[in-house]
Amino acid sequence: MLCLVKIMDKQRLNNILSAFFFKPKKIIFLHDKRYSNKSDISGIKNVLKLKLPSSTVEFVEYDSRNIDSIIRTCTGVTHKNPICYFDITGAGEFSAIGAY
């Protein structure tokens, strides 16, 4: 898999499971800064660097309460990464609809 886009989940383990299963070359996490903190992001980066050292990890902020922000963010990601797959399992309903 070339690129996995994951909408961050509040449960830390859920954020990394799909990356472990699919082993993508690039992993992009979409996160709302109101619900994620530096510790969560740092922990995810460290675990993925250890377990998937050849994968690139990026974090992109979006506003999970604004459907236009969700759509703009997802569109921007897909324009930069035309072959990507979305994991929306950890997303709230609003984020999942916007990503769809």
Image: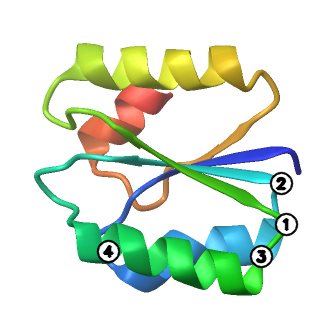
The three-letter amino acid code for the residue at tag 1 is: Ser
Question: Mark 2 or mark 3, which is nearer the start of the sequence?
Answer: 2
Q: CA distance from mark 4 to mark 3?
A: 17 Å
Query: Which residue type does callout 2 highlight?
Result: Lys
Q: Earlier in the sequence, mark 1 or mark 4?
A: 4
Q: Is mark 1 in CB contact (under 8 Å) with mark 2? A: yes
At label 3, the amino acid type is Leu
- Asked if residue 6 is positioned above or below residue 67 in the image, the reply reads below
Q: Residues within 10 Å of mark 3 (few under 14, many from 20)?
A: some
Q: Nearer the viewer, residue 19 or 51?
A: 51
Q: Is disc 1 in contact with disc 3, using a CB cutoff of under 8 Å?
A: yes
Q: Which three-letter amino acid code belongs to the residue tagged 4?
A: Asp
Dot 1 falls on a residue whose secondary structure is: loop
- How much space separates mark 2 and mark 4, taking CA atoms? 21 Å
The image's mark for residue 40 is: 4
Counting residues from the start of the chain, the first of labels 2 and 4 encountered is 2
Q: Mark 4: which secondary structure?
A: helix
Q: Which mark is residue 52?
A: 3
Foreground label between 1 and 4:
1
Total count of labels: 4
Q: What residue does disc 2 label? A: 25
> According to the image, label 1 marks what residue?
54
State how far apart marks 1 and 3 are (Cα). 6 Å
